[in-house]
Amino acid sequence: MIDENGLLVGAVVDDTDTLEFINDLTTSVLISLFTDATAGDDDVIPDGTSLRRGWWADTTLGSKLWLLERSKALPSVARQVEQYALDALGWLLTDQIAIEVNAAAVWLSSTMLVLTITITRGSARPISIRFANLWDFL
């Protein structure tokens, strides 16, 4: 889990998992969410420039969470955070690492958005990763 300071504070381990695997999975989730994906032609760039970011060598890597950096604390923004997170983590399903990935975003205040990612892999217990200060990263 990620605490309110953005630090990794623990992970759930059952009989089929190792802490090493869960740390690798958590690292993969962090990279997927907090690497800037390339904005689409129809995306509005928040700083008004034409800089679409992303990485030229892999246009599918990352998320579009950065596009929300100047957004207001609205329920619709929380829904967009969820969708961008699911889009960024879709490779977990494609690569058959997970059978289900869920994202839930909730505003705790006008400056604190909590994002919880839940990853289900076969019969293993789901792994949840919670970002308590997501808005600070955007």
Image (tube, rainbow, N blue to C red):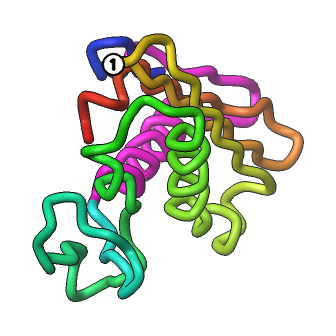
Q: In this view, does 128 lie to the left or right of 2?
A: right
Residue found farthest to the right: 123
Magenta region includes residue 2: no
Up/down of 55 relative to 80, above or below: below
Looking at the picture, which amino acid does disc 1 mark?
A: Thr
How many marks the image carries: the answer is: 1
Mark 1 packing: few (<14 Cα in 10 Å), some, or many (20+)? Answer: few
36 or 66: nearer the eye? 66
Q: Where is residue 87 in the image (x, y as percent from the top left)?
A: 57, 64
User: Depth check: 132 or 50 in front?
Assistant: 50
In terms of image quadrants, where is residue 49?
A: bottom left
Q: Residue at x 70, y 44 (%)?
A: 102
Q: Which residue is located at x 72 percent, y 24 percent? A: 14
From this view, report whether residue 6 is shown above or below residue 103.
above
Comparing 133 with 79, the one in front is 79
Q: Is residue 102 above or below residue 93?
A: above
The span picked out in magenta is 9-35
The residue positioned 64% from the left and 34% from the top of the image is 104
Q: Where is residue 132 in the image (x, y as percent from the top left)?
A: 42, 19
Confirm whether the magenta stretch covers residue 29.
yes
Mark 1 — residue? Answer: 111
25 to the left or right of 93: left
Q: Whole-percent x and y of residue 58?
A: 32, 83
Is 10 above or below relative to 64?
Answer: above
Could you tell me which secondary element the residue under label 1 belongs to? Answer: loop
Viewport quadrant of the C terminus: top left
Q: Where is residue 119 in the image (x, y as percent from the top left)?
A: 68, 42
